[in-house]
Image (cartoon, grey):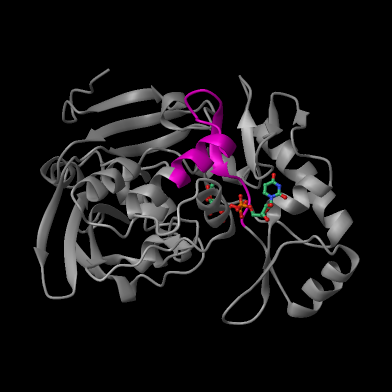
Amino acid sequence: MPIPMLPDFVTSQVDLTPYNTLALPARAGFFARIHSVEQLIALVRHPEFIGRRRFVLGSGSNLLLAGDFSGFVLHMDIPGKRRISEDAAYIYLAAAAGENWSDFVAWTLASGWPGLENLIGIPGAAGAAPIQNIGAYGAEISDFLHQLTALDLASGETLTFAARDCAFGYRESLFKREGWHLSGRYAITEIVLRLPKAWRVRAAYGEIAAELARGGIRNPTPAQVAQVISALRARKLPDPRQLANAGSFFQNPKVSAELAAALQHAHPQLPCYPQPGGGVKLAAAWLIEQTGWKGRNLGPVGMHEQQALVLVNRGGASYRDVQNLSRAVREAVFARFGVSLTPEPVVLADQRTEDRGQRTV
Ligand code: EPU
């Protein structure tokens, strides 16, 4: 219901179950659906907003709700995508925060601007994409991001962050590293992508190459790569509208070269990806599958039968259920391989929930 003191796009005591793809139940004290930057600026200056906790929500596809949140949830629903400009080497395109990322990718391809095809099908909103540096099939958004615009929710100031200032890493950025994604420091309002005009598709990733070979495709177009990836994703990753999930539940762990070598000696099938800066990344899904958790449930949650890295809510799960399964899987992997898994999604907890020590997954 609307609150007299606040603009009419703010409601109170809102059920967040439909706003997180894992479908965990929680209530927001205040919920603002933001359709424009002007609305956001108006809210930021409002006396009822100042001093309260805030959380910037995109599509909730990488989110774990640890309980009710007493502050403001700002649901970024700002629409808009456009070609900004081009120079000899690049085309510059903008997506407002509320654009669906995958639809944006499809639009670029349909417009004849290749580059983002490997990132098709990743759920979520464009404004959230840089926060965890979304990636799949050998590409990450940081390969293409030119800059982003954000509103400082404390000062009301509009800021531009160049890509080089975003400290991107594997599922990592300045926004995440500084905890700003949880403290509601900034709301990203627009991202600008820079697509090289001289583009060669990246189809060397094992699964893509195999799928293309199966279809007899030698020199794939970006659209064909997108098609293959969409089909692969549909086969392995459950659609949250049918089976609630938050994508990969754990990050792929990076371990020392020594540990990787020892593990590979004991398990010759172990997928290992040596990293440019040293260390080796292991496939968390493979480790989980070896422990027998793939396709297994604990209460109303389970690890998906097609992709062991995806934790699914089979109906009515609570945050406690997710914690229990997360712990069981992490313990099993650690007991077998001596490797610690780190959950990937963002955990949103109220101060009070944190005080009760319920925050860890
Ligand atoms: N594997 C298994 N069992 C499984 C699934 C995979 O043994 O159940 C093995 C595969 O055989 C392969 C390896 O694990 O050797 C890697 O699997 P896959 O290529 O499916 O990718 P992933 O490492 O499990 C990552 C991203 C996904 C992204 C895919 C495709 C992370 C945490 N996850 O998964 O991103 O779609 O690569 O590029 O980096 C997400 O972040 O939410 C997400 C879904």
Left or right: 275 as drawn, with respect to 1: right
Q: 353 or 285, which is in the foreground?
A: 285
Can residue 157 be seen by looking at this rendering? no
Residue 304 in sight: yes
Q: Residue 31's image quarter?
A: top left
Residue 34 rendering spot, x and y as whole percentages: 22, 37
The quadrant of the rendering that contains the C terminus is top right
In screen coordinates, is 71 left or right of 66? left
Magenta span contains residue 163: no
* Quarter holding residue 148: bottom left
The percent coordinates of residue 59 (x first, y second) are 38, 38
- The magenta stretch spans which residues? 228-251
Is residue 86 toward the left or the right of residue 283 in the image? left
Residue displayed at 17% across by 64% down = 91
**Could you say which quadrant of the image residue 30 lies in?**
top left
Which quarter of the image is occupied by the N terminus?
A: top left
Q: Tell me how many marks there are.
A: 0
| Residue lying at 11% horizontally and 73% vertically, measured from the top left | 87
Q: Where is residue 121 in the image (x, y as percent from the top left)?
A: 41, 43
Q: Residue at x 43, y 63 (%)?
A: 202
Taking the spot 48% from the left edge, 39% from the top edge, the residue there is 231
Looking at this view, is 95 or 211 the one in front?
Answer: 211
Residue 332 point in image, percent of width and height: 84, 48
- Residue 218, placed above or below residue 356: below
